[in-house]
Amino acid sequence: MATFKVMTWNLENLFSVGNSFGPKTQEEYTQKLNSLTNVILDLDPDVLAVQEVGDLQAFEELLAQLEGRYPHSYVSTSPDIRGIRVGFLSKLVIEEHEELVDFPQGGFSKLLSQDTEGNSTEITRMSRGALRILVRPKPNISIHLINAHLKSKLLTFPSTTNRPRFAPKDENERSRVAGLALLKRTAEAVALRVKANELLENNANQGLIILGDLNDVPSAATTQILQGPSGSEIGTRGLNQPDKGDDARLFNLAPLIDEQRRYSRIYQNNKELIDHIFVSQELLPGEPRKLPEVDSYIDVMDALPSVNDDPSLRRGKPGSDHAPIIAIFDL
């Protein structure tokens, strides 16, 4: 294998018929599976990190349509309250897997939040568990990959019914819930960074990739927490000048996407890049650094739809409201 191709894609509510977040009819479900299948087979990554996997039956049925290309897979056992979780599909043997759920030592031990009825509570774990795997693209190259889906910017307000409420009663409620969501996404980003520190310190000869739906743009504070030391990011003059921060640094590949295509979702007609791929320096070898090919496949399903704060509007729609992001590394 001369190259290593990784992809991250939010599949947008991959549920079977009968779930309140899934397609209403078998025909819609079939269209959903077929549209996802066609994209994956066409783009053909070596390792695919997926988010918003609902029930496992839907995941298995999607896997069955992929012509046996992905004999190795692993899905998180720690979904959120909606039932969505992250997972991996891989052409390569998954030599290790680890579920990352609880806030680790070195990060936040607990965080203020509220339950579905609006009562104050404390949380000690991520909204959706992250997942780490280890693969070996070549006999002498092993790579850790961490797939994460951080707390959404979509606000869900306390409800006295069985249906979630997406509109606030007043501005006090909106600002309070928004603040708690930001705190939670921050704690989750810190948890990923603490795990990255452990891997970077103890595995100097292994690469690290963190990828997934981080639910915010490259310049957001929660996204930048993952970078580590600043000073030689991609797109800066310091990139090819080694410094003492390189061993701990994670490079966001976002600047390598053509500026006109540098988005992965459209929210209220605003283009946002909220799906990311971070890599350690082992994935950028040489002097000058060998950079991968990176793209956001915004047109793989025609045009991306514009979404709003009502997730039910796209229930049963084929494809996804996110674009797949791919990086191809020359090994």
Image (cartoon, grey):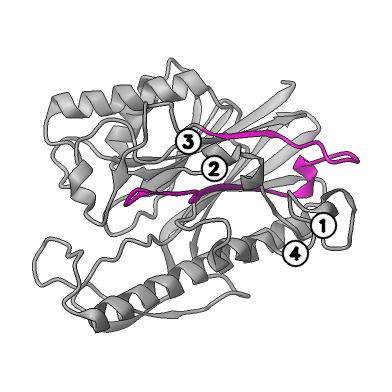
Task: State which region is magenta.
Answer: 267-296
- Outermost residue to the top: 67
Q: Nearer the viewer, residue 250 or 174?
A: 174
Q: CA distance from mark 1 to mark 4?
A: 9 Å
Label 4 residue SS: loop
Name the element at disc 3. loop
Which corner quadrant holds the C terminus?
top right
Kind of residue indicated by mark 3:
Pro
Q: Is residue 107 left or right of residue 110?
A: right
Other-residue count near label 4 (Cα within 10 Å), few / some / many at <14 / 14–19 / ≥20: few
Residue 297 forms part of the magenta stretch? no
**In the picture shown, does residue 172 fall above or below 326?**
below
Which SS class for mark 1?
loop
Residue that appears at 18% across and 76% down: 117
Report the residue at 34% width, 40% height from top.
321
Residue 246 is tagged as 1
Q: Position of residue 28 (x, y in %)?
A: 18, 28
Judged from the image, the secondary structure of the residue bearing numbered disc 2 is loop
284 in the magenta segment: yes
Relative to 120, is 328 above or below? Answer: above
Q: Earlier in the sequence, mark 3 or mark 1?
A: 1
Amino acid of disc 2: Arg
Q: Nearer the viewer, mark 1 or mark 4?
A: 4
Q: Three-letter amino acid code at disc 4? A: Ser
